[in-house]
Image: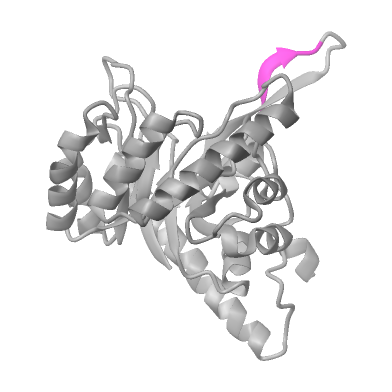
Amino acid sequence: MRFSVFTAATPEWSPEEAVRELAAQGWDGVEWRITDQADAETPGFWAGNRATWPLTGLEESVPEILRITNEAGLDFSAVGGYAQAADHDNVERMLSATAALGAGRVRVTLPKLPVGDYRAVFAATRADLEWAVERAELHGVQVLIELHHGTIVSSASAAYRLVEGLDPRRIGVIHDIGNLVHEGFEDLGAALQILGEYLAHVHVKNARWWPNGEFGIDGSTVWAPYWASLHEGQADLDWLFRALVAIGYDGWVTLEDFVDDNRPREKVLSDDLAFLRGAYERALMWAEWVASGAGDDDGAGPAEQA
């Protein structure tokens, strides 16, 4: 596997600073955030992010993106776009830029809930993706959709239903275990098998549910999900890597760490890289153990292994 960072997670750094630090730490690649964002006095993950390239005028930025990425010795794991699948003009822009960068793959986003008539919106989005796949074929790239809470596709089952029958060379799914803590979690072994040839990319972050300080009308505690560091969240990342190894996945794993815990950003990322590498190494050891005949071979979680 190869490891990269989505630059939403590096808001304080300029693009040059981001790639320089990632390369120095030993990351294999970068996933650039591309969107028109709001300004902010203090750089943040979603507004004022200094490591984000604007969608408006993206064509003019392509040579600079390519230059600083190549000079740092990093590869593109994908392009982190935010163009809605129904926004054909900007999807075309992202596909063209991805081809020019040689980045291979680009994310498009899906309608957010609530959508009114879910079936109608789902069908319309399928039509949008059919169009995107045709354009991706012409550009020689791949469209990615992400398992994401609060959208029409929060689970592997829903994502497979949306892309089933389309060319997996031109459309794939991003599995994101942190998003699944919010909504859409399915057994990891089953979920990855459901996606099958459509599993094209993996995002990793973590989250956990906490009481949000409010109470229901009956006095019950109200819970809400919050982002957490990789080692403190509810998602079992060892299970994720075992499940990925079990199906032979050997592609990109991109970090998305949106926790601000007062550690310097370079410390957060170096700790995260060590964590991810450790989880992968343990998964490989587990696979050897399974191959020896001592254990299960389905990437089972702790409870199932007991």
| Residue at the image position 22 percent from the left and 57 percent from the top | 23
| Magenta stretch secondary structure, dominant | strand
Q: Position of residue 160 (x, y in %)?
A: 67, 51
Residue 276 placement: quadrant? bottom left
Coloring scheme of the render? one colour
Looking at the image, residue 250 lies above or below residue 220? below
Q: Position of residue 236 (x, y in %)?
A: 63, 54
Span shown in magenta: 210-216
Q: Position of residue 135 (x, y in %)?
A: 41, 46
- Specify the farthest residue to the top: 217
Could you tell me which residue is drawn at 47 percent across and 43 percent down? 132
Left or right: 113 with respect to 276?
right
Q: Measuring 35% from the left and 44% from the top, which residue is drawn there?
A: 95
Outermost residue on the right side: it is 218
Q: Is residue 58 magenta?
A: no
Depth check: 89 or 186 in front?
89
Outermost residue toward the bottom in this view: 292
Q: How many marks?
A: 0
Residue 293 seen in the figure: yes
Q: Is residue 261 above or below residue 134?
A: above
Quarter the C terminus occupies: bottom right
